[in-house]
Image: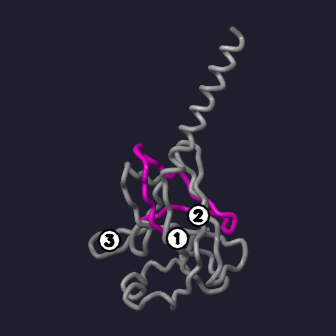
Amino acid sequence: MRYVTCVLVGFGLAVLAAAGSASAASLRISDAWIRSAPPGAQVMGGFATLVNEGETPVTVQAVQSDAFGRVEIHETTTEAGVSKMRELPRLALEPGATVRLEPGGKHLMLMQPRRGIAAGERVEVVFQLGDGSRVEAPFEVRAADAMDAGHAGHHGHTDHSGHGHD
């Protein structure tokens, strides 16, 4: 009886471990980049495409990076011609859903850089999911002037290099 109990408990833990990693395996992060900022800037914007390739919803509960003191998910909206930015407490992706973190919309606010971060570098960013799993993604730092003129010109108002977060 003791052997059967141990086998069942072990099997149950294996099932839980597999279920816990299902969300992480189903979240794909691509085209991840950070807009460079002038030296001394305390805020940078992060952008990427997130896709839930799984069959269950995925919730991004938090985002972090060793390169920054704080990372928040934000959304820029326009109301009555005025752009407003607000923090999103989480980001939910239904099965098959795609969420674009892009200038002028949902994006990452990367605050309090712990060192100088220059164009051409890669910065690891970790997405913490609601089931406790984590997805790491390398973000390429791109020079603001290297972006295509139409993209930068249309979304230039979301450059967070001068944003006043502490």
Residue to which mark 3 is pinned: 78
Query: At which x and y percent is residue 128?
Result: 57, 52
Tell me the residue at 50%/46% (across/down): 23
- Which sits earlier in the primary sequence, circle 1 or circle 2? 1
The reply to whether callout 1 and callout 2 are in contact (CB within 8 Å) is: yes
Residue type, label 2: Ala
Residue to which mark 2 is pinned: 137
**Above-or-below relation of 55 to 152:** above
Q: Nearer the viewer, residue 117 or 146?
A: 146
Q: What distance separates the C-alpha of mark 1 from that of mark 2?
A: 7 Å
- Specify the label residue 32 is tagged with: 1
Asked if residue 53 is among those painted magenta in the image, a careful observer would answer yes
In this rendering, does residue 162 appear at all? Answer: no
Q: Is mark 3 on a helix, strand or loop?
A: strand
- Which sits earlier in the primary sequence, circle 2 or circle 3? 3
Tell me the residue at 67%/79% (across/down): 117
